[in-house]
Image (tube, helix red, strand yellow):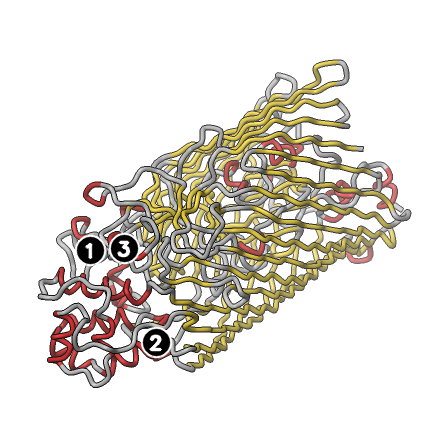
């Protein structure tokens, strides 16, 4: 009855798990560590003190997370140096980067470089791990490749989230929050025994918030004048069953839904296409340009005439079973089984203006879903000299993506403006007009007729069709994948001071793609009519004809996608792993070195992709691998009250999967090489002052692309838009990133406690665009969160006054090219050796912004 006795002597089943089965846990919300020896992590799938683990781990206790206001993985970045989390077109497009490396989340065909693991279950996309995390026990951020133990595709790192398990001591927690922007949040949890061997926990939450963008709705029909709202609910139930003294089972089921408006963009710079948008829309249509088309002042006013509603549903179940095998040398067999289904339906104003140009409706025909089954078995044991682990992991995944595109009433005149302005700017004797599309599409057009039509701005010799108003295409993609892996991770204690760890993993991936690309309602007819007149267009415009054909036959209007079917299948295997050596110079100092090879699977670009106006023959992109070297030191000082760790890292990524927006489409390119080198340092001090602790970290990162040419790319035609990358610093890779937090909590008498905390993060400047255009730079910034608490010693009630982004820092999450609104890159090499010339840049730049200052009051009760 060893296990049952342990449970009866502790306040939480999570403590039992930490001792017996590797669950996370602290006995109560505020019982955080008080010395370095109390900091326990599961970075190697077994309970170890942080200072004994030869890898970089930023570990955050429940108290630290609560003090910093962490509810989801985006909030987590203020406590983690070298990590950024961004969202773009929707909250379904979430990207985590560590040491400057991550996978842009707009395309579900790409798996994440930074893995998210919640209670032992791998989430295959960052967006599937983005949501209310509920009652967290702790979070561990593991930097560098972690593919040996943590599922698959963790070439840049892992966010390992461990939630509170059921308790055999009854308890109830409730929280009520009110804040600015109309914020209101409520959550409650209850836990306790159902029998001597069965405990349960139930958590429910609902949060709402008004938007922090003001929206000019332009032509309509959108009526909502705010964006970036929040409205979600979640429920999470758990059972912990101990049928015998050697078996534990933890069943978790959760459900969450979001119904919000997100995401509009604001103009950072409005380019020369402004007069066309202004002329077509009610009102200005977008932020008026600055003098000389320079950068605009920071503003939270966006322009969108179409709705940006998004509906997301997430549900899943997992079962973890642990069995102590007393007859097998005391080994433990662990089984983790999970099933998850995540779906999204999104609306989008594609042009981010008040003009009615292009959009996607939230009608179930734009979004994606992920269905995932996983099964992991681990057998782990230990002798006096060896800690060993062997395992098997299998997953089956199905991704369904639907895409739909609508032309607004302004699309045809806007495209006419663009094409005629391009001809006039090139010296052709034609006026800028909204009526020239019909010149190119007139049946049986001749060179003479086309010339006359263009000369009169479409008034004479035209009569051809324009683009339809309404739905133009409806595509559907289904990617199925299976993955199997066998792995081992074994530590040999060569001496009492010297350890060697060897981890190996062989992964076999098999993926197939079935896609249907369909133009509907005559969505490709304008392109077909133009191609039929290619001879006449070439006779009049010469080399400029290719621009006309390419612009009219962009992917969403290209007749080559009429009733097109895509079917591909590929499989690949990869050996990854690690070897680590650590030596303890004393009880307080350990040095270590390691090599790791990580692997991220190949995939398919689930989108329309074309070279020129010809659809790409294959949507496959290859696997990404990384070779990583680390050397570090971990020190525990001043009577185990101070932690000071530092690690040098050197990582080289081969075939780095870059997903980038080129102004008209997302493309995936395999960049031959990306290197990221630098230093991670962490500090923690439990000061002599009762209740006061300091924690911080610094990351120096030198992340650069290797030199490459067009011939090194899968599609050489993409090189002009990527020509700023060779030899340059990667996006989202600030040279310096530093975090710091001060936490104070102590009794003030009369049964009361007071607490105060500040958490800050500083980053030097970095580029927020994957193409590295200069207008997408984010200046150095500092974010500051704070909290003051007052409550009873026994935490029966607590009042918190809190603020996020206290200094109201104005910053950009991601900057991007305004669709169809100018061009940054030229068609020929410029004097600087790239295809970019700032003097010729006509691009309008938009951005998704970071959140402004928010503040409020939270009431907590505990029984």
Query: How far separated are the C-alphas under marks 3 and 1?
Result: 34 Å
Query: How far separated are the C-alphas under marks 2 and 1?
Result: 26 Å
Return the residue at label 2: 615
Res 85 visible: no
Query: How far separated are the C-alphas under marks 2 and 3?
Result: 34 Å
Please give the name of the residue rendered at 15% of the width and 65% of the height, measured from the top-left corner. 423
Q: Which mark is residue 279?
A: 3
**Sequence-first tag of 3 and 1:** 3
Please give the name of the residue rendered at 62% of the width and 49% of the height, measured from the top-left corner. 232
Q: Under tag 2, what secondary structure?
A: strand
Mark 3 packing: few (<14 Cα in 10 Å), some, or many (20+)? few
Q: Nearer the viewer, residue 106 or 622?
A: 106
Q: Under tag 1, what secondary structure?
A: loop
> Where, quadrant-wise, is the C terminus in this rendering?
top right
Give the x, y percent position of residue 344: 56, 61
Q: Residue furthest front?
A: 459
Q: Residue furthest top?
A: 749
**Quadrant of the rendered structure where residue 529 is?**
bottom left
Q: Tell me if residue 639 comes above or below residue 357 in the rendering.
A: above
Q: Nearer the viewer, residue 139 or 445?
A: 445
Say whether residue 663 is left or right of residue 117. left
Q: How many marks?
A: 3
Q: Nearer the viewer, residue 32 or 301?
A: 301
Give the x, y percent position of residue 427: 9, 63
Q: Nearer the viewer, residue 719 or 152?
A: 719
Say whether residue 771 is left or right of residue 315. left
**Quadrant of the rendered structure where residue 305 is?**
bottom left
Q: Tell me if residue 25 comes above or below residue 349 in the rendering.
A: above
Q: Which mark is residue 834?
A: 1
Res 22 visible: yes
């Amino acid at each position: 009855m060893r296990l049952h006795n342990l449970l009866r002597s502790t306040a939480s089943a999570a403590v039992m798990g930490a001792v017996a089965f590797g669950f996370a846990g602290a006995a109560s919300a505020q019982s955080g560590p008080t010395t370095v020896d109390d900091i326990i992590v599961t970075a190697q799938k077994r309970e170890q003190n942080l200072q004994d683990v030869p890898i970089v781990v930023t570990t955050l206790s429940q108290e630290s997370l609560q003090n910093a206001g962490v509810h989801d993985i985006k909030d987590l970045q203020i406590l983690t140096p070298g990590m950024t989390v961004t969202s773009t077109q929707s909250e379904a497009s979430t990207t985590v980067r560590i040491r400057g490396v991550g996978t842009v989340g707009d395309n579900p065909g790409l798996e994440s470089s930074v893995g998210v693991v919640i209670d032992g279950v791998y989430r295959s996309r960052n967006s599937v791990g983005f949501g209310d995390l509920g009652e967290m026990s702790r979070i561990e951020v593991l930097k560098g490749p972690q593919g040996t133990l943590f599922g698959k595709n963790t070439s840049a790192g892992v966010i390992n989230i461990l939630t509170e398990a059921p308790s055999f001591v009854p308890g109830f927690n409730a929280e009520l929050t009110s804040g600015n922007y109309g914020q209101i949040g409520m959550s409650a949890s209850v836990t306790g025994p159902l029998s001597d061997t069965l405990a349960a926990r139930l958590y429910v939450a609902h949060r709402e918030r008004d938007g922090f963008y003001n929206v000019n709705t332009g032509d309509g029909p959108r009526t909502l004048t705010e964006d970036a709202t929040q409205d979600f609910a979640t429920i999470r139930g758990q059972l912990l069953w101990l049928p015998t003294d050697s078996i534990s089972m933890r069943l978790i089921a959760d459900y969450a839904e979001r119904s919000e408006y997100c995401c509009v963009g604001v103009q950072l710079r409005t380019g020369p296409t402004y007069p066309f948008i202004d002329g077509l829309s009610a009102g200005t249509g977008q932020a008026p340009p600055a003098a000389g088309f320079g950068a605009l002042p920071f503003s939270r006013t966006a322009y969108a005439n179409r709705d940006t509603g998004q509906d997301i549903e997430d549900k899943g179940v997992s079962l973890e079973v642990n069995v102590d095998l007393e007859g097998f040398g005391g080994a433990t067999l662990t089984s983790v089984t999970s099933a998850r289904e995540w779906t999204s339906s999104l609306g989008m104003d594609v042009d981010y203006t008040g003009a009615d140009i292009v959009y996607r409706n939230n009608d179930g025909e734009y979004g994606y879903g992920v269905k995932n089954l996983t099964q992991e078995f681990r057998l782990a044991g230990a002798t006096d000299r060896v800690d060993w682990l062997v395992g098997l992991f299998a997953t089956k995944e199905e991704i369904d993506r639907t895409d739909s595109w609508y032309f607004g009433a302004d699309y045809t005149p806007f495209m006419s403006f663009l094409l005629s302005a391009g001809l006039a700017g090139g010296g052709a004797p034609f006026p800028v007009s909204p009526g020239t599309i019909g010149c190119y599409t007139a049946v049986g057009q001749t060179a003479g007729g086309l010339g006359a039509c263009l000369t009169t701005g479409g008034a004479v010799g035209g009569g051809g069709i324009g683009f339809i108003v309404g739905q133009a295409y409806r595509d559907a993609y289904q990617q199925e994948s299976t993955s199997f892996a066998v792995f081992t991770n074994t530590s040999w204690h060569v001496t009492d001071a010297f350890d060697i760890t060897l981890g190996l993993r062989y992964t076999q991936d098999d993926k197939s793609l079935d896609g249907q690309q369909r133009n509907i309602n005559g969505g490709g007819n304008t392109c077909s009519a133009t191609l039929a007149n290619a001879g006449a267009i070439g006779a009049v415009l010469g080399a400029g004809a290719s621009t006309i054909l390419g612009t009219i036959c962009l992917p969403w209007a290209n007749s080559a996608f009429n009733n097109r079917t895509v079917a591909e299948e590929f499989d690949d295997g990869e050996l990854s792993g690690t070897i680590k050596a650590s030596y303890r110079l004393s009880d307080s100092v350990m040095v270590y070195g390691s090599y790791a090879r990580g692997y991220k699977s190949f995939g398919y670009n689930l989108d329309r992709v074309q070279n020129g106006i010809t659809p790409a023959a294959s949507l496959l992109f290859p696997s990404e691998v990384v070779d990583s070297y680390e050397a570090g030191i971990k020190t525990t000082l001043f009577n185990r009250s101070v932690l000071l760790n530092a690690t040098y890292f050197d990582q080289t990524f081969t075939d780095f999967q870059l997903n980038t927006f080129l102004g008209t489409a997302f493309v995936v390119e395999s960049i031959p090489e990306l290197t990221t080198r630098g230093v991670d340092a962490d500090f923690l001090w439990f000061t002599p002052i009762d209740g006061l602790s300091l924690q911080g970290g610094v990351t120096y990162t030198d992340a650069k692309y290797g030199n490459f040419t067009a011939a090194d790319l899968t599609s050489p035609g993409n090189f002009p838009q990527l020509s700023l990358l060779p030899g340059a610093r990667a996006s989202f890779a600030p040279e310096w990133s530093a975090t710091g937090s001060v936490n104070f909590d102590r009794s003030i008498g009369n049964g009361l406690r007071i607490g105060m905390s500040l958490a800050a993060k500083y980053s030097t400047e970095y580029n927020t665009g994957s193409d590295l255009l200069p207008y997408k730079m984010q200046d150095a910034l500092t974010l500051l969160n704070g909290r003051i608490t007052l409550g009873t010693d026994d935490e029966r009630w607590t009042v918190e006054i809190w603020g996020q982004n206290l200094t109201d820092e104005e910053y950009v999450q991601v900057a991007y090219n305004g669709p169809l609104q100018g061009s940054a890159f030229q068609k020929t090499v410029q004097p600087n050796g790239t295809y970019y010339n700032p003097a010729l840049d006509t691009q309008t730049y938009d951005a998704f912004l970071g959140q402004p200052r928010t503040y409020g009051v939270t009431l907590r009760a505990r029984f």
